[in-house]
Amino acid sequence: MKLQRLSRKELLAAFGFLAPSLAGFSLFYLIPFGQSIQYSFQDRLVGSFTLSNYKELLLSSSFQKAASNTFWFTAISVPILVVVSLLLALLLNQRVFFRNWLRTAYVLPLVVPVASIVLVWQILFDWNGTLNAVMEHFGFSRQDWMKSEWAGFVIVLVYVWKNIGYNVILFLAGLQNIPDQYYEIAGLEGAGPVRKLFGITLTYLTPTTFLVVLMSVLNSFKVFRETYLVAGAYPHDRIYMLQHYMNNMFLSLDIQKVSSAAVLMALCMTGLMFVLFRTERIFRSYME
């Protein structure tokens, strides 16, 4: 009885501490998303139940283009970000010159405001920017980077530069949790650097790698701010993302289409997260 009373008191205390956060989450996230689900199934004129919003959305060429660009951006940028972050973390985990300064340099993009970051990239890739000036100096013609197929490359570069510091921190934390004895024993048994990398480092970094992939995928859906500030509300077709589509539908007050697009995007992200967690669980059970 005493244990039950104690557990009830602890449960009530836990709910008491969580109540403000739960209230804020419900007020600003859960309830609006529930309303979005409701609006996505409502006719914009009568208000009755309908599936035509989703049908129109899936048949829309603008939505198809935005969904395709978002998919390819995530599929290309996330592997690049994960691989580069891992290589930098492996480098910074060694005794290299100016290691602490390099760590600080990679973390700086996380704390710098987005507007300042975009200003730097505008200076670099503008028609009269630094990169075009350097190219013209060496005899090459100027490029309108943000209004050509190169725009996708620029956004991937901005995304990697903006998020690489956070991933490097996670990988460094994972690397420092691997006991040095494992490498010493492997060295005594004649294992080389490549064998140690694949047999010890990458194996014990598996949970961290899944976390980095998860965070990188989520952050890839937040690239709208940088793209919007660099290229505006109607950028080149190559970088027209789902967030652009929803923002434009919101400005035109087409709430049903915005809600339908938000619900589909949430379902896709949920399915992707489920696949990642499922893959991690299978891999962990295989390793055990």
Image: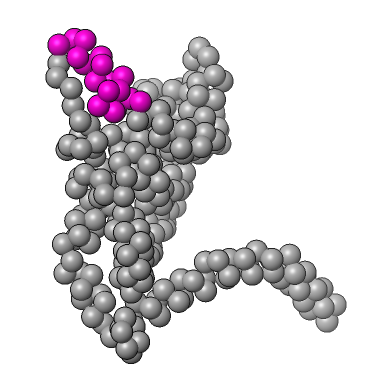
Q: Position of residue 211 (x, y in %)?
A: 45, 48
Query: For this rendering, which residue is in front, 10 or 29?
Result: 29
Q: Residue at x 22, y 32 (%)?
A: 145
- Position of 272 with respect to 61 (left or right) is right
Q: Is residue 4 above or below residue 102?
A: below
Closest to the observer, 267 or 59: 59
The image shows residue 288 at horizontal and vertical percentages of 44, 52
Image x and y of residue 129, in percent = 30, 23
State the residue in front, 62 or 79. 62
The residue under the point 17% across, 37% down is 148
Which residue is farthest right? 2
Q: Nearer the viewer, residue 157 or 254?
A: 254
Q: Position of residue 108 (x, y in %)?
A: 52, 29
Residue at 19% in and 10% down:
138
Residue 205 shown left or right of residue 263 in the figure? right
> Which residues make up the magenta segment?
123-139
Q: Magenta segment: does it hold 127?
A: yes
| Residue 82 occupies quadrant | top left
Q: Main secondary structure of the magenta part?
A: helix
The structure residue drawn at horizontal position 36% and vertical position 64%, both measured from the top left corner, is: 250
The quarter holding residue 39 reads bottom left
- Residue found at the very far top of the displayed protein: 138
Examine the rendered structure and indicate whether residue 148 appears above or below residue 36. above
In the picture shown, does residue 230 fall above or below 266?
A: above
